[in-house]
Structure formats: C-alpha cells, structure tokens
Amino acid sequence: MSSPPPPKRHKDVPYELLYWPGLPGRGEHIRLLFEEAGVPYSDTAHAKDGIGAVLTQIKPTYPGDEGNTPLLAPPMLRHGGLTISQTPNILQYLGVRHGLAGPGDDDVWRVNGLALTALDGFSNEVHDCHHPIAIALYYEDQKEESLRRSKDYVANRLPKYLAYFERVLKAAGGDWLLGGTLTYADLVLFQCLHGTEFMFPKAFRKAREGGDYARVFQLVDAVQARPKIKEYLASEKRQKYSNGIWRYYEELDVVPEEQ
Amino acid sequence: MSSPPPPKRHKDVPYELLYWPGLPGRGEHIRLLFEEAGVPYSDTAHAKDGIGAVLTQIKPTYPGDEGNTPLLAPPMLRHGGLTISQTPNILQYLGVRHGLAGPGDDDVWRVNGLALTALDGFSNEVHDCHHPIAIALYYEDQKEESLRRSKDYVANRLPKYLAYFERVLKAAGGDWLLGGTLTYADLVLFQCLHGTEFMFPKAFRKAREGGDYARVFQLVDAVQARPKIKEYLASEKRQKYSNGIWRYYEELDVVPEEQ
C-alpha cells in the first residue's frame, strides 16, 4: 500500500503509552518516535501509579477496552477508541501517521521489515543472553547458560546483524536505512544498538574500532545528533538502563575469542 | 488506518514465496493465507533449486532487488517490484490485500498484534526450546539446557499463551479471534498450535483434556475444517515437520510437573 490516510476519528485525541516505569525497555522505541515527530504523549513511566496502569490493562480478568482485544503485555498504545500492543505494531501505526514510514509507495513494508529485524537481533536475542532458560527464573539461576549464550552472541549473532545493517546502508546509498529519508527503522536501530552497547561494551568497542560497520555507527551518531532526540536523551524523561532487556553484568561483557 | 487500498501497480502479477524446502517452518503461515484466500503463488519449497533461490536472495554480496533493501532471512515475498521479508510483515501485506485483516477500521492493527503474539509464544519461544544457547550449535550440544527450557515452557509459557488466546476468544464472543470474521491471525494461531502440538504432544493432550482452553482448541479444529485448508493439508504441498522450528524429541516431550 502507499502510505494510507490516517483514520479520521482518532485524529485529535492524545496518545497514551503504557509501559513499565524504571527502564527504557521496549517502550523506548516508541518514545523516540514520538520525540522525533514532535508529538505529545502521556507515558505511564512518569505517571503516579504507572505500574498499576499497566497491570490493570493486562490482568487476566480485564476483558479488553471496548472493541479491542485483551492484550498480553506492554508496550501498549491507547489512541482514541483503539488500544493495541506489540512494539513493531505500535511503531508502524505511529510511523504511518507521522511521516516516519518512508516517502515511497510500499516503503511501509520495507521499514516494518527492517524494524522487525533490528528488534530480533538487538532486542529479543540480547534479552535471551541473560535469560536463555526461563523468564520465570532469575539471572542468577541461569548464569552459566547466560555466559555460553553471550559468548555465542558476540561471536556470531552480533557480527551477523551488524553486517546486515551495514549492507542495507551501503545499498541505500545515504545516511539512513532507506537512503535519504529518516524513518522509524533508523530510530529503532539506534536504540537497539545503544542498549546492546550498554550490555556488551567490550564487543562494541571492538566492532566500532574494526571499521567493518562504519555506516552503522555513523547512523547511531547521526540519530543522537538530531536536535529533538538529543534534547530528549539529555532530559530526565530518558530513563537509565536497569533490569530490563539491556543489562550490564561484568561477567557477560565478553569479546569474541581469537580463532 | 481503515483497510488501505492495495497498490495498483502490483495488482496483476504473481506472488512468489521464497522459503527453505523440506519443512513447513515460518513459510507455512504465509502458505495457509494464500490457500484460504484462494490466491495462486509460486513456492521455492517445490521449485527445482529452491535452496539456491533462497540463498541467492540472502547472500552477503547480493545488493537487494532494485528499490528494495537487502534481506537477512526467509520467508521472503516477491510481488512485482516489491521484495520483503519477516513473517508478520508478509502476512500483513497479504492480509490487507485479500480481505483477511478484519472488516473494521483499525482491525489491521488488532490482527497484526494478535499474529505477533502468537508467533512469539508458539514459534519463537518454541524454537528456543531446542536451541536455547546458540543457533550455531547442534541440538545435541545443548540438550540439557533444552530440557530445562522445555520444562519451563510447558509449565509456564504454554499455559500463559493458551490462557491469553482463550481470553481473546471469550471477549470476541465468536468463533474467531476478532469474533465473527476469520482473519490471518486465526490461521497463524492454528499453525502455531499445530506445530507446538507436534513438539509437545503430551503437554498438549493434557491442555486439551483439562478443558480450560476449549475455545482455542475449537478454533484449531474450525480452521482445519475449512474446505480450502482441509484440501491443502491433505495435499502433497503440505510438508512434514522436520528439523525446523517445531521438532519432536522424545526426551523433550514433557508435561508440567505436579506441584
């Protein structure tokens, strides 16, 4: 589809982001989109009882908002009569509405594919580096397995995904994943790499210094330098990493072993 | 957005699905959508050199089709000038075009959210039950960890996701996840559960007999009974499970331990 027209009935009502307070997490991709677009939004991260607001929406007895399905987990977005979940879904909804899903016919599908791939490689897989066995268990109950998985991640997965995005940027022939126009996929890639660098600083330093992914790191720097993003990152609204997807454990801060 | 109009320039060209031959895998969700919609498509699973066709498209030196980004992994869809990847992305593209993304304004976002959640719970998490440490390693190199993860999956994750979809169906008040109208999210949920049952038959028998997820299993049966799906499942086009996402290992076929 070409960028579809936004539905009229939601047009002038505020956006509400529902996500756990206390860490950037999956909500951060959505916040960066709002900030870059200059769109106001409320955020349970800064609400009086943000945890309660999230829990109410996902508790097993909650039937779902009128006309919407029940939701399993945050991030969630409420916008007029619509309440939806799933990070890439919310991003696409907002990206289409605010001109961040590409200029061309069909770019919305390219951008969605890129965002999903960045989330696979630098969010989902990274989370599992400290929880390879069970989300229900503490990290301390799966430390050995986490180390094994982290070693594999920095040796195989990190270079695979970095090389992929380097290749995309090379083919695009511009500063951004689609070439000349910033899209929300660039914001997602920035946040994903920012978080993954927090978790694996040594492997990242090596990757940056190696020079094989120059375009990718240029994109990271370029996103951080955008005025609205820069202002947001320096503000109190930007939360610190904590016990979320991207965590720092000294023993997991490994580099690929020399062959 | 309300269901957007399909882009005209792709309208009358054939669909090409690129996916590994020899197993249903992530390509199967897309095949089921094609079959239910009655839309013709080519499929590298049944092509002369299907593996070669997939490999060509994802090899690191391939710059991407004209105007498209390079792609990392199958499934991939080629349709006229557009080549895209990522299962939920392809499903959404096709679902919108073929009336399987819901009848109402904004249903496309609800359906995408449901499909992403089903893929999280019954495809991505299930895959990691036999590969919790590294995709680069054989199952045999991570058997102990796989058993630990599988025990957690059937005890915690499987009931969590089954209960969620039961709740969605209850709130919808009809046979399908959106109520009265079949969408591609129903097809995804069917395939996800069909595959997960293949991997964990004992836990599934227990879940079915327990009666807590009656609506979910009714949906599984109802999808299988749809004439086009039924015909497809009985045909030679339907491939057998193999060493893909959904695998059978006797030692992983566990049931939740009694408390």
Image (cartoon, coloured by chain):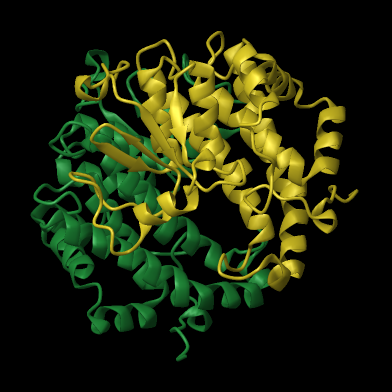
Chain colours: A yellow, B green
The residue located at (86%, 29%) in the rendering is A210
Classify A123 as above or below A164.
below
Q: Is residue A220 left or right of residue B103?
A: right
Q: Residue at x 57, y 65 (%)?
A: A135
| Residue A182 x %, y % | 54, 14
Quadrant in which the N terminus of chain B is drawn: top left
B28 relative position to A47: left or right? left
Residue B112, how many percent across, how many down? 32, 41
Task: Say which of A92 and A169 sits in front.
Answer: A92
> Percent position (x, y) of residue B167?
25, 62
Q: Quadrant of residue A28?
A: top right
Does residue A86 appear in this view? yes
User: Outermost residue, right direction?
Assistant: A258
Comparing A79 with B41, the one in front is: A79
**Image vertical order of residue B173 relative to residue A42, above or below:** below
Residue at horizontal 74 percent and vertical 55 percent from the top: A150
Q: Position of residue B209 (x, y in %)?
A: 24, 84
**Quarter of the image where one finds residue A160:** top right
Q: Is residue A65 left or right of residue A179?
A: left
